[in-house]
Image (cartoon, helix red, strand yellow):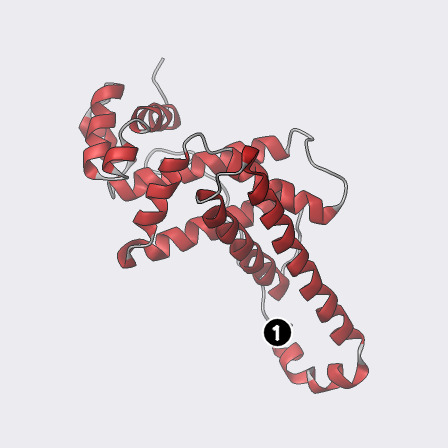
Amino acid sequence: MTENPNDKIDRLLDAALMHVPFDGWSEATLKAAAKDAEIDLAMVRALCPRGALDFALAYHARGDAAMIARMKSGDLPERFRDKIAAAVRFRIEAVTDKEAVRRGTTLFALPMHAADGAKAIWGTADKIWDTLGDRSDDVNWYTKRATLSGVYSATVLYWLGDDSIDNQATWEFLDRRIEDVMRIEKVKAKVRDNKALSALLTGPNWLLSKVRAPMKVPDIDLPGSWGPRR
């Protein structure tokens, strides 16, 4: 049976993890992983056209997939704020090698790769909201994902430096960030309920009401459309 692209990517990533701590997400790691996984370099170029950058993004996508699978397993708490916190925690716990994330953070901090790193973080937030059943199609679609992107990225950075037992300090940090977001939502609700402030914001609110969420692009699985699993 012919091995599908995702299985090849998984083998490459598994082989890469022993090299990433020393060489980072680099061309050297990519070539070493291809050799260890016994995958032809030409095939690797097809799977990762931009080389190490696409390789690092594939590792991020694998973590997203593991998070979604755990969220759908029924392992979520009842309260909605706790569901969001649990999803972020699931995403971090999906990481099998903290050094791989540390090296990825270094890669995406480079100016030429910053946009790809921001897109990956936004994508994680988008997947969390979609999996939780978010159906917003207005400006709230953007604000929810922007806020969660900030919470997720800040928590990851804190986690990278956390040496507490079972990452307890990180989960406490995450709870504080979620609580900060909930306070902001409460303030927004008070503003909406205040007639005087609502009147002052009539113009901006009208403008924001015209904002719509982007159209969802359906997943495809056709030759020439290889990419990270959804």
Count residues near mark 1 (Cα–Cα under 10 Å), then give few for <14, some for 14-19, many for 20+: few
Residue 86 drawn at (x, y percent): 64, 40
- In this orientation, does residue 227 appear? no
Q: Is residue 74 left or right of residue 221?
A: right
Query: Residue 88 occupies which quadrant of the picture?
Result: top right
Q: Return the residue at label 1.
A: 208
Query: Residue 69 occupies which quadrant of the picture?
Result: top right
- In this orientation, does residue 65 appear? yes
Query: Residue 56 occupies which quadrant of the picture?
Result: top left
Q: Residue type at mark 1: give it.
A: Leu
> Given the current orientation, which residue lies at the most extreme top position?
1
**Mark 1, secondary structure of its residue:** helix
Q: Nearer the viewer, residue 40 or 222?
A: 40
The residue that appears at 68% across and 56% down in the rendered structure is 179
The residue that appears at 73% across and 38% down in the rendered structure is 77
Residue 183 drawn at (x, y percent): 70, 63
Residue 214 drawn at (x, y percent): 53, 58
The residue that appears at 30% across and 28% down in the rendered structure is 16
